[in-house]
Image (cartoon, grey):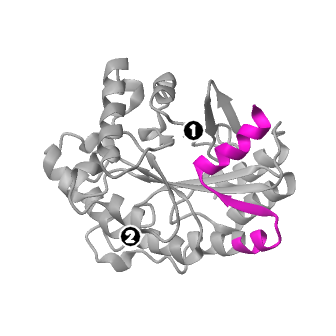
Amino acid sequence: MLSEIWHLTFFSLRKFPVHFENCMFIVSIDIDVGSNKLGIINKGRNDADVHRFMSEFEVGEVEESVVPMLIGFFDELEVPVTFAVRGQLAEVENSLLKDLLKSSVKHDIGAHGYSHRRFTDLSRREAEDELKSIASGMGRFGIKPKSFVFPKNCVAHLDLLENYGYTCYRGKGGSFSSDGMYIDKSGSLFDVHPTSFLWRGSNSFFGKKLIDLACKRKLPCHFWFHSWNFVLPTQGYDTPVSRIRLDDIVLKQLFTYAKRQAEKCALTFETMASATQYAYDVLC
């Protein structure tokens, strides 16, 4: 709560130079693994790159249950969001990529690295190998990702993103001083900057206040989270799918509120990719 208070106070006082026609409400979701099969394929080698306490197998198992529920949630709302998918998921049969492509809403399917390694730890050649593998794997599904979310939010090798056809990325946030309500340009790429991180402990009151502020000042409001962030720890990670309560958590409350604001024409729902298209007209 202290962080949320600081976010609201800091954003209220801070001047953001670029304003748009309306507030753009943006949500990006990180899919760190997407399948327990990747934990088996990688034999635990990537565990430390994914989660401090859970194995890659466990994270993948949770996401196999959670992501289809999130897709259904946004389908029901008829709202597009950015799903930043780990590229290695393209190697798995019955991949969540198929669920995203079958969605009744046209979501922005972006990339979240190939093996979920920090790009700041990669040499230029290693980073290019990751991007090549993403392009090859997702290309088999007919997907050409335009949005990139760096694993662990470690931003590096931006020039390579340009070479592989990306138009935008999510910049490094994580605190009230590094988060923001803006879209910035770096070379030919756009930084669709994060406004605030969401999880099961977030307070919807402050989220709504951030939306109000963005609507009043016609700024982007970009929430992000990992697909496993709404797991209830009291139930443990090995409980059934019912662990996710999308009807009474902050996610449902924020989107219900945002839908009301959209009905008043105070905001539009955008993905990272579509927000970039609007930003192009303003910043270029």
Residue found 29% across the figure and 44% down from its top = 137
Circle 2: element type: helix
- Please determine whether, in this image, residue 273 is positioned above or below residue 113: below
Residues 98 and 76: in front is 98
Was residue 278 drawn as part of the magenta stretch in this picture? yes
Quadrant for the N terminus, please: bottom right
Was residue 212 drawn as part of the magenta stretch in this picture? no
Is 70 positioned to the left or the right of 255 in the image?
A: left
Q: Residue 180: where, in percent of width, then height?
A: 69, 43
| Three-letter code, disc 2 | Pro
Number of residues whose C-alpha sits closer than 10 Å to that of mark 2, classed few (under 14), some (14–19) or many (20 or more): some
Residue found 50% across the figure and 76% down from its top = 246
- Please determine whether, in this image, residue 152 is positioned above or below residue 107: above
Residues 174 and 235: in front is 174
Residue 55 seen? no
**Residue 101 figure quarter:** bottom left
Residue 18 seen? yes
Where residue 68 is drawn, which disc sits there? 2
Q: Mark 1 points at which residue?
A: 168
Are dots 1 and 2 in contact, CB under 8 Å? no
Number of residues whose C-alpha sits closer than 10 Å to that of mark 1, classed few (under 14), some (14–19) or many (20 or more): many
How much space separates mark 1 and mark 2, taking CA atoms?
Answer: 25 Å
Q: Residue 206: where, in percent of width, then height?
A: 70, 62
**Residue 282 figure quarter:** top right
| Three-letter code, disc 1 | Cys
Q: Give the range drawn in magenta.
A: 259-284
Is 145 positioned to the left or the right of 205 in the image?
A: left
